[in-house]
Amino acid sequence: MDVVIRGRPVVPARGEGPLRRLTRPISLWGGVDPVGGVVSDPRHPEHGLSVAGTVLVIPASIGSSSSSAIMLELMRERTTPAAILIGEADAILSLGVIVGIELGYPAVPVIELDPAELADIPEGTILTVDEEGRVAHAGGG
């Protein structure tokens, strides 16, 4: 594995999945269907795309305190991303993950990093995220 970038772990954990980019910030509340794990906001450019099991790259979260509840629902439904790489750390979203871990759900790493640093990696490339915030993939990049 070649290290691609190192971000700041907000919720340190391991995750692996295909790269999925969202081009605009998203609100989990009303923006992501927790049962299906898909972008449900019809105004979002990636409406209808699944985030479940992906290494989700988002510039930021548009938040309310409800984002933590939606994250918990995603964790309960097992439709979370495998990891979240976010341009601007979101305490509310991260709190949902932390509470979910305390309730016994599998951890979802949340790593703060500049999404532009992953721009040369093709969508769908399998990425591995570790507890130290390293994002890697086979084949260089």
Image (cartoon, rainbow, N blue to C red):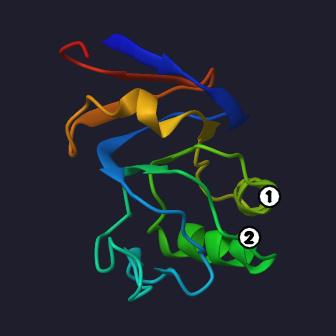
Q: Of residues 11 and 61, which is closer to you in this image?
A: 61
Q: Is residue 50 left or right of residue 22?
A: left
Q: Are marks 2 and 1 in contact (CB under 8 Å)?
A: yes
Q: Please provide percent x and percent y for residue 59.
A: 54, 51
- For mark 2, give the secondary structure: helix
Q: Please provide percent x and percent y for residue 66.
A: 75, 80
Instruction: Name the residue at 56% across, 87% down.
Output: 30
Instruction: Name the residue at 63% across, 82% down.
Output: 29
Quarter of the view holding residue 102: bottom right
Is the residue marked by circle 2 packed among few (<14), some (14-19), or many (20+) residues within 10 Å?
A: many
Q: Please provide percent x and percent y for residue 23.
A: 39, 58
Q: Tell me if residue 32 comes above or below residue 8 in the rendering.
A: below
Is the residue marked by circle 1 packed among few (<14), some (14-19), or many (20+) residues within 10 Å?
A: some
The dot on residue 64 is: none
Q: Gap between marks 2 and 1, in whole Å? A: 6 Å
Instruction: Name the residue at 71% across, 46% down.
Output: 89
| Residue at numbered disc 2 | 68
**Which badge, 2 or 1, is on the more N-terminal residue?**
2
Q: Tell me if residue 25 comes above or below residue 94 in the rendering.
A: below
| Residue at numbered disc 1 | 95
